[in-house]
Amino acid sequence: MVKLIAEQIPVSAKHTPLLVLGVFEDEVEGIMNELDGISTTIVEVVERIVKDKEHTGSFGSSCIVHCFTGPMQRIMLLGLGEKKNLDKEKVRVLAGKAAAKAMEINVSEYSIKPFAQLTKDFTEAVCEGTCLSLYKFDQYQSQKIGESSHGASPVKVSLLVDGDREKWQRVLDTTKIISDAVNFGRDLANLPPNDCSPEYLARVALDLSSKHQRISARVIERYEMESLGLNGIVAVGMGSNRPPKLVIVEYRGNEDSSTNVPYLFVGKAVTFDTGGISIKPSERMEEMKFDKTGGCDVLAIISGLANLEVKANVIGIIPCVENMPSSSAYRPGDIVRMYNGKTVEVINTDAEGRLILADSIAYGIEKYNPKSIIDLATLTGACIVALGSNIAGALTNSPELFDKLRRISEKTNEKFWELPLYPEFNEQIKSKFADIKNIGGRAGGTITAAIFLSNFVNKTPWIHLDIAGTAWTQDGTWDKSYNPKGATGFGIRSLIRLVLDESGSK
Ligand code: BES
Ligand code: ZN
Ligand code: ZN
């Protein structure tokens, strides 16, 4: 794993295999000021490169200069694009590109001069771009990428700062923990469905609790769910011979009884969604291994918050099931009595996510009376139709809570778009034989899924996040240096920051 170090040292004195320097497209000569104190030969080479337009500073382009003499062995000129356009997201992407290039040329460590100015936002972005772009999921590949002659991951990146090294190191340390949480979430979500069963996820939660003093975990088994009346989860799990598990993880970072009301996160973890008896078409069905991402994200959020030692209490509820067709599977036509007593007519067994989330939310409210609930779920294909594969749907009963998330998302660049939760949509899920049914027809599929969930939420501030389009890189996903193929960990950064900001730590 890469280490990020803030170093207070003039650029010209830094001994390093690679020094990364940013070049603005509309201020190319500005690079000459950055080279203050560096040997004149190198300055002349760089001058020639920019004069001859071998490097123009266009966004994301790079050019490596070998130095032969002096403390740095190479310089990477990295195009920053136009000065007025540089923002936090661009810095994140650029840091990701620099890291990828460094890996390609096989340097084990490099140094980076902050682009334009040294700010908290840009420092966070350098750290995120670096850690997130170096992520690899290669545990199933016989020849590891890092084992070939090219492409070993850098192990150390130095950010060259002027003044208050410790302050910048703290920013890097916090951001590194958050980025590691994202990569942990990605690692879980990328696992194949033969290895990652509900039981496996339960084991991961128990492992977290044995590693962290302040995390505890418990697993509610199928027979216990039956006796508690968590019949939505039991029903969806019936088709698989890998039994469902209801995983509950608690992080206790706040002992102060006047402020310790917990946050509740609920994550859909369908370890594989075949659709059940209402079976899905086989084309791209393998992608349904990512239907567990919401639950993996919740495990990652709790682990990140614990590593940050945040002064808050956080509960994660993760219903884990495999949705399979078999002679024991639940059927269209079944009527299920849910945990809160409402009856649901199953019309389509592929609309399973809302059944397991509904029980988990109702159980979480009753048991923990949380201050807020945020659920994450790859819930509807309709969300991809509505918002594409780069924006998550957000449906909420609390404009105040969503406003907080929206403000944070401007910094994290994880995009959430609100869809309306008008109660009139309840009409679409009226059932002939039960209180409600589990699908609401083609119109407004993401909204009717959320309306279904709203039947299990009381007045507690709640946001439902539909991450069907954003949980992994798919058709239409914007290419980003820091999002390698597969699970993205979308949402983890924003939700950790939400709790971190609210609890006043860091
Ligand atoms: N896991 C799927 C939703 C999904 C589909 C996520 C594609 C990401 C990509 C969910 O369980 C599902 O199958 N939903 C159905 C609901 C329908 C039957 C009302 C859907 O979206 O088609
Ligand atoms: Zn489904
Ligand atoms: Zn699903």
Image (cartoon, rainbow, N blue to C red):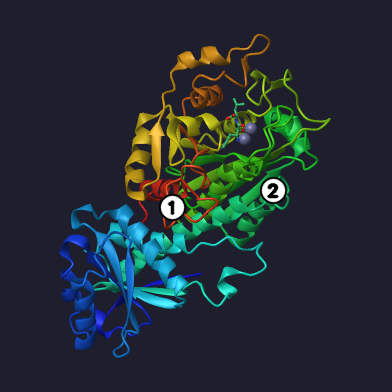
Distance from mark 2 CB to nearest ligand 3 atom below 8 Å: no
Numbered circles on residues, count: 2
Q: Quadrant of residue 52?
A: bottom left
Q: Is residue 237 left or right of residue 247?
A: right
Image position of 54 with respect to 226: above or below: below
Q: Is residue 233 left or right of residue 72?
A: right
Mark 1: secondary structure: loop
Q: Is residue 271 left or right of residue 394?
A: right
Q: Quadrant of residue 7?
A: bottom left
Expressed as whole percent of the image width and height from the top left, the position of residue 134 reads 48, 64
Mark 2: secondary structure: loop
Instruction: Say if residue 398 shows up in the picture.
Output: yes
Q: Can you identify the residue that label 1 sits on?
A: 311
Q: Residue 149 versus residue 200: which sits nearer the camera?
A: 149
Image position of 283 with respect to 61: above or below: above
In the image as oriented, which residue stretches furthest toward the top? 432
- Circle 1 packing at 10 Å, graded few (<14), some (14-19), many (20+), is many
Q: Residue at x 68, y 49 (%)?
A: 202
Spatial CA span between label 1 and label 2: 35 Å
Instruction: Say if residue 10 shows up in the picture.
Output: no
Amino acid at dot 2: Pro
Expressed as whole percent of the image width and height from the top left, the position of residue 317 reads 59, 41
Quadrant containing the C terminus in the rendered view: bottom left
Amino acid at dot 1: Lys
Expressed as whole percent of the image width and height from the top left, the position of residue 125 reads 34, 59
Q: Can you identify the residue that label 2 sits on?
A: 193
